Image (cartoon, rainbow, N blue to C red):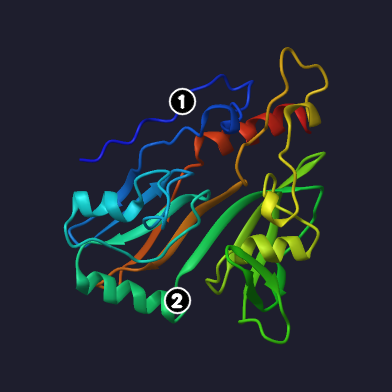
Amino acid sequence: MINIDDIEIIDDDEPLEDPRKRGPHIGKIQIIQETENWAAINKPPYVPSLPERGKFTAVSVQEWAKSQWPDAILCHRIDRETSGVLLIAKNPEAYRHFSMQFEHRKVTKIYHAVVNGQLHFQDLWIDLPIIAEQVGKIKIDRKNGKPAQTRFKSLQVFRHFTLMECEPKTGRLHQIRVHLQSQNACIAADTLYGSDIPMLSWVKRKLHGTDSPLIPRFALHARNLSLQDLDGTALSFEAPYAKDMEVMIKLLNRYDV
């Protein structure tokens, strides 16, 4: 089995150390639930779904899955920095079954994001087409973009941030991030789409020691995935927050209310 180091356990009163100083800590891929046909996993941040071209930062989910089950195929992908639930088919039949549900938008995907500012979204529906502006970056393009729809709902509003539920109806690259940016609601630490790295000093008035990031990567987590099994049974998988996002939310509850 390919070994991926555990994420570092830290004091709940302190955020993760800035990975720009020593590189990010990469957690183990955890299996949430599995059968003979599929496995639902919790992907750590900084682990790519597929092998990266021209560089290596971590063993990809695809490579890890192949080391566990030779016929494994990823049913979908999430960004390298995004943590959370991914579904892996263990055989071609399961892959065909699940891929058809993704293709026909019969899968419910719920993400949680920590967003800059106080936002009170109640089932806000964003229907804005998006297009690749350049390699690795997406923008809104009402004329030439591909259809993209996302529903947003505020779960918890802090003094400087909001915990947001995001439900993409389509599966475009960077869709949630771009749609939030269009509402002046950038995801915390998403420097590609207009955010700064949030610092502990933003929420904690009295610091002891050096200031450090509340979270070192954009705060987006694939929380829940719901679809149907091969026999028609309803499936729903929930992924616990990655350690860095868990710590950030604890800090916000302690210092930003």
Q: Please state which of residues 176 and 4 is positioned toward the viewer in this rendering.
A: 4
The image quadrant of residue 244 is top right
Q: Are marks 2 and 1 in contact (CB under 8 Å)?
A: no
Closest to the camera, between mark 2 and mark 1, is 1
* Residue 8 numbered tag: 1
Disc with the residue nearer the chain's start (2 vs 1): 1
Q: Which residue sits furthest front?
A: 54
Quarter containing the C terminus? top right
Examine the rendered structure and indicate whether residue 41 appears above or below residue 173. Answer: above
Q: Amino acid at mark 2?
A: Lys
Asked which secondary structure carries label 2, the reply is: loop
Q: Which residue sits furthest top?
A: 208
Q: At which x and y percent is residue 167? A: 59, 64
Query: Which residue is painted at 72% across and 87% down in the image?
Result: 143
Residue at label 2? 106
Asked which secondary structure carries label 1, the reply is: loop
Query: Which residue is painted at 31% across and 60% down in the image?
Result: 88
Q: Residues within 10 Å of mark 2 (few under 14, many from 20)?
A: some
Query: Which residue is painted at 38% across and 58% down in the image?
Result: 50
The image quadrant of residue 71 is bottom left
Examine the rendered structure and indicate whether residue 140 appears above or below residue 238. Answer: below
Query: Which residue is painted at 81% across and 47% down in the image?
Result: 117
Q: Amino acid at mark 1?
A: Glu
Q: At which x and y percent is residue 8? A: 46, 25
